[in-house]
Amino acid sequence: MTKRKVALLFGGASVEHAVSIQSARSVFRAIDPKRYTVLPVAIARDGTWLSPEASWALLRGAAVPAAGSAGGPKTDPPASPGFPPGPPWRAVGSPHLNAADVAFPLLHGPMGEDGTVQGYLELLGIPYVGSGVLASAVGMDKATMKRLFALEGLPLVRYLVFERRAVQADPDAVARTVEEAFPYPVFVKPANSGSSLGISRADDRSTLVRALREAARYDATVLVEEGLAVRELEVAVLGNEPPEASVVGEVVPRRAFYDYEAKYTAGGAELLVPAPIDGALAEEIRALALRAYRAIGARDLARVDFFLDKGAGRLYVNEINTMPGFTDRSMYPRLWAASGLAYPALIDRLVEEALRRAGERNDRR
């Protein structure tokens, strides 16, 4: 059997750079070497694509030389969250990518999960794992995502959308509009951001104005959502014709809410797989997850997140993540492991699905 060449794209110009590296290392350790040859393609924090040698070094855990040296730019994440300076995606491309039969873009957040890299792979004609350009972009933009969910009739927490220029021009006027619509607390989010970056809880006018300004630092569109006391539930979706939903999991933050620190600090949250809920509720959540997946045109994989109101017992779709964390300890693979699909078999399914789609596209030409 001829081995397929799989390009693992990882790193990237987002705050989830380090998470992406861990995802790629987990896949590299688990992928079947008898079936696949791995070709690492690493992207530095400043958007520079690393050489094959530097990509191998980073994948294997070796130190990568600093910027200006022969090995390429430094790829370590910054001490605090933030976006890298300068224009992204300089020196685009890699010999490894051009030699691949299929790409697995394990990139999380903006400039990787938002349709940009997907569009590049489409131009190159390289099959790839995951959603296409449109679904990836919609999955990253929470405002557009919610509008499509609403058209599908999915249950959503009440929300408002504001443009950055309105927040910057008169944040108190925006705050008054929010206060007329919702009681406190409220949650304020940048529309396009990963890892809960820039999300704040506001309990009064002063914290709301501060939260609006903070969210506007990260994106041109700001969401404000009604704050409810909720449980956070998640479902993994896999495949296409038809897609399948996993068992339901639950995230139990040990902070006020599931923010950046809770996600990436040891002990910041407890992951319960499966979630302690009754069977009827689990089936309802799984059905809604599949509807959300189809609503944006997702393919191959996604994680759909839910809120369960602790008081009223109402269920809400929160968001969809088209390239969730993919380490062997991440929620997405854990949900599938609990559903009977082990991590190496999950990787096989995703790679083979991408190759199958490529074959069908070639047949139609």
Image (cartoon, helix red, strand yellow):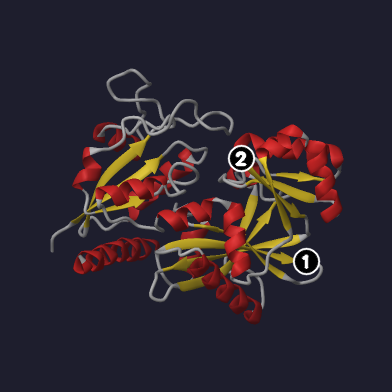
On the image, the x and y values in percent for residue 157 come to 72, 62
Identify whether 122 is placed above or below 197. below
> Badge 2: few (under 14), some or many (20 or more) residues near its Cα, within 10 Å?
some
On the image, the x and y values in percent for residue 353 come to 31, 66
Q: Amino acid at mark 2?
A: Ala
Identify whether 130 is placed above or below 210. below
Q: Amino acid at mark 1?
A: Lys
On the image, the x and y values in percent for residue 268 come to 65, 47
Looking at the image, which residue is at 84% across and 37% down? Answer: 206
> Badge 1: few (under 14), some or many (20 or more) residues near its Cα, within 10 Å?
few
Q: Nearer the viewer, mark 2 or mark 1?
A: 2
Judge whether residue 286 can be spotted in this image: yes
Which residue is denoted by mark 2 in the rendering?
A: 220
Numbered tag placed on residue 310 in the rendering: 1
Label 2 SS: loop
Name the quadrant containing residue 354: bottom left
Q: Is residue 216 left or right of residue 37?
A: right
Looking at the image, which residue is at 34% across and 38% down? Answer: 42
CB atoms of marks 2 and 1 within 8 Å: no
Real-space Cα distance between discs 2 and 1? 32 Å
Numbered tag placed on residue 318 in the rendering: none
On the image, the x and y values in percent for residue 162 come to 69, 46
Name the quadrant containing residue 60: top left
Front residue of 81 and 336: 81
User: Which quarter of the image is occupied by the N terminus?
Assistant: bottom left
Looking at the image, which residue is at 13% across and 60% down? Answer: 2
Label 1 SS: loop
Q: Is residue 276 left or right of residue 362?
A: right
Q: Is residue 116 left or right of residue 312?
A: left
